[in-house]
Each structure stands twice: as structure tokens, then as C-alpha cells.
Amino acid sequence: MTSLLWKRFVWFCLCLTLSTPPAWSAGGVAIPGYAPAPGVERSYRVQKATETDMSFWFDKPGASAMTVRGAFRQRMTVLSRDEDGMRVRWSLTADLPDGIAGLADSYQMNLLYRNSLTAYGTAALELETDLNGNPRDLSGVDQIVAHMWEVAANGPGGVPAAGASAARQSGVYDIIAKLEANPLQIVAALVPEAQLLATGQSYQDETMDIGPASTTSRDEDYGGVSVPVTSTWTLKSTDATARTATLSLSEEADAAAFSQSQQPAIANLMTGFAERAKSLTADQLASVKRASKSRSVELVVSLNDGSTLEASEIVTVEAGGTTLRTYTHILREDMPASLPLPAVLTAKDMQTPDLHIEPLPSAKAGPGILDELSIPPAPPKTSQTVAPDNDGPKAIAPVSLEVKSAKVVSAPTSFGSELDIMLTPESAAKFQDFTQAAVGEITQVLINDKVVIEPRILTPITGGHIVISEPDSKLLQDMAEQLTFPEAKILVRLRP
């Protein structure tokens, strides 16, 4: 995230001389400070895509890579502005804008985003920002957090959740704790466009020359590891008729420090692919343990009011033998597009995961997916969705899961014990696929044909862990012993 102090420093380094906007002068191009008109609603077309490549870990072609994309139309109004900052309202929707190419079901981000809006219980956010537009505070946090606690307690649609273990499995408590510790994560989850637009906006007038690059550096925190990031800004061109300037930003994280920050996630990934990891050569193992992160941004800025009219961003993360690349394009609807769109954002035919995503009930719902993972989860191998039955609704096939380990541990958030079950890598992928398809549904976990828990799936469950809470530790120990026998399996299905 771009801090206010760093943003000022970047623009200071870019500045050659201060002058009054907007004009071309012998000293360069004058770019005005951001001065939006209060009370005017601006609409933005937003297109996003995420490409995940895990071909290093998979032998089967097509099982290693997938693309997920979304298209949105979000609206922003500056409610007020003074010398200290601004108050901004974003009106949010998951609906596909008119004229989007391709089938609606190829825009799976929209379905996930709709569930996220339902989970947070809001379709609008009011932000306090600095004069660049960087979010620094959020109104209504207490109501959003209270809504999520209610979801955790009652389950989607008001149906009681099947025990605290179900909420822990789905990560609801972890998400709530993160939001309470840093409410701006709500902004990052629901309206990341605010931060990207702010990247091109300065709180004061600046003068720049076309061509010369300016480099600055800062530190970012990744799980307690300080990672130096080098940023290079360039004024690429101007358009006197449209009264715009096009800037580029290139960022690179220090490879050694970033690799260090990603080692816990890489270790988890290697655990999930333990058999494959055992066969790695020394060079392959060294490659897996390296990580890198880069960011490329192009921005079209108005020479009338200093606002960002268009932005295109590509972020690439490579770690643990995987590559995750995200694309974002934002265009203010009253302006013509001038930046090229990556092909992935408009492609009619592309490889997408075969997911069946059910909308969560609008009254009370579980949380959607937050893209906060450094390492992407393994993509689904097969679809869990089958043809509609005679009653109409789609069915989700049960899955039989193989157990890698099972042990009784102390419950971390309450008195008592839990049975911690770790699945094999193949079963972990099947379980993730099943829970992805079963979001919002009540399921059953069976051991030796006996139902032991009935959790409602609030978010896809990654990592291959199943946790069963039970006050009777002897009963848990009996189940653990049953699961240690060769060929021990667990059946997971929708509740009949």
C-alpha cells in the first residue's frame, strides 16, 4: 500500500520545479494537484483477471493453470474536502456492466464478489482519505464486523452453524480478527480501485519532463520481514487536445528479502506436494525456494484536476514453483480509453476453473474470498457439479478422502480438544474443489459411515485440514485411531 509520506516523497523526487497548473513550460509539464469536484459522482469500468500457473507441481496438462476474471461498474463521489483530506463514498455492485464480451459464467470473480458484499453486509463504503485519495479510515466498521460475527454465529440465511469448528475450518474467525486489527482490509477486499487510482494522484502541483526516469525506494512488511521495494516513475507522453499525461510506474521487490518472507508459505506448499518435493533436484529445490514480486502500472492523469482517468496494472508473484499474475484495468466512463488492454481481460475463449458457485442468502451470509494469499491454492482437478436431477437443483457429488495423519490436540480458542486431520495432497485438492462448489451448503463429514460433524461451508477450505471439536477427548482419540488404519478414508457429502 502506498503511504502518504512515501507518496509525497515520490512526487517530490519527480518534481523539477513547482508551477501553477495546467500548462506546458520550458521546464517540463505541469501536472496539477488532485482537486476533484465535491458532490459529482464518477463511474468507473473495472476489469480484473488472475492467472495461476502451477505446472511445476502437476504432470497432467491443463490441471496446472487457470484464469479467473471479473468486470464491474463502480461509482465514486467525493462528499467533502478540506486541507487535511477528503470524505469519499463508493457505491459497489457485482453486476456485469453492459457490453462485456464473453459468457457471463466466464466472469467468476463477479459471483465471488457478490458473496463478499453479502458477507460484509454492505453495498457502499464511506472512506476518509488523504488529499491524494489514499484510504486512511473507514466509516461503519463496527456494523460490518458485527454483521460478520452474526454470520459466524448463525450461519448463512440465519440457519445455526454446526459448531464452532465449522467456523474455524472456514476461516471466518481469522477473517474477523484481521478486520478488527486493520479495518482498511475491508477497503482492500471490496474497493481496491481506490488505492490504484490514488497512485497517479498528487496532493500538490508537480512539474515533470517527458522521458527521464526517477527512482525511489521504500520498505514493505511481509509477515514481519522488511522487504525493500524499488520504484521507477516516468512521464511517458502528454496529449494537449485531451489535456492528459501518461505516466508509468515500475516496482521490484528485493529478491532476497522477498524470498525470505515467503519461506513459510513455500514450506506449506511443499508439504502439500510431499511426494513431488522428494524427487526435486538440488537446482529445482533452490528454484522453488526463490520468490520475486514485480508491479507494472500505467496511468492517464487529467491536466485539469489531477485525477486519474485510466489505470492499468499487472502484478506478478513467483514463489514455490508457482506464478500468480493479476491484471487490473480501470477507466472513468466519461473518458475515452487510451491504454491497451491485456488480452486476458477481453478473451472470449480461455481456460477457466470449472466451479459451481451458489449465491449466498442476502439476509445473512458467510464471507467471500479475500485475495490475501502469497501462494495461490491448487486449482480444481475435476468438476464437482453434475447434471441437474429430476427435482431441478444441481447436485454435488460426495468425495472420498484419504488421510495422511490424524491427532488429538488442545483446542486453541476454547477448553477441550480437537481432532486435527491432515489429508493427502490429492485428497486436499478434491476437498478444496468440493468446498468451492458447496459454498453456502450444509455438509456432512462421515468416518466409518458415521456422521461426525455437519458444517456449513462458508468459504472454500484450502490446505487439506479438517478439524473436529468434541468435549469428549476419548471419543476423539477413538476416531483418530480409526483413521490411522491403512486405507482409512473420510466421506464428505451434502446433507441429505
Image: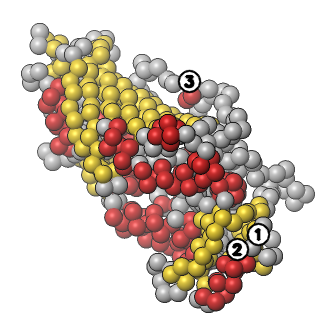
Examine the image and state in which quarter residue 41 appears.
top left
Label 2 crowd (10 A; few <14 / some 14-19 / many >=20):
some
Task: Mark 3 or mark 2: name the one nearer the start of the chain.
Answer: 3
Q: Residue furthest front?
A: 282
> From the viewer's perspective, is residue 44 above or below residue 109?
above
Query: What is the three-letter code of the residue carrying label 3?
Result: Ala
Q: Which residue is mark 1?
A: 486
Q: Residue 108 appears in which quarter of the rendering?
A: top right
Q: Provide residue 155's location: percent of width, then percent of height.
A: 59, 71
- Please state which of the two labelled residues, at mark 1 or mark 3, is closer to the viewer: 1
Q: Which residue is mark 2?
A: 484
Q: CA distance from mark 3 to mark 2?
A: 49 Å
Which secondary structure, mark 3? helix
Instruction: Please say whether residue 161 is visible from this viewpoint.
Output: no
Q: Nearer the viewer, residue 348 or 122?
A: 348
**Amino acid type for the residue under numbered disc 2:** Thr
Q: Residue at x 54, y 79 (%)?
A: 409
Cα gap from disc 1 to disc 3, whole angstroms: 49 Å
The residue under label 3 is 343
Callout 3: 10 Å neighbours few (<14), some, many (20+)? few
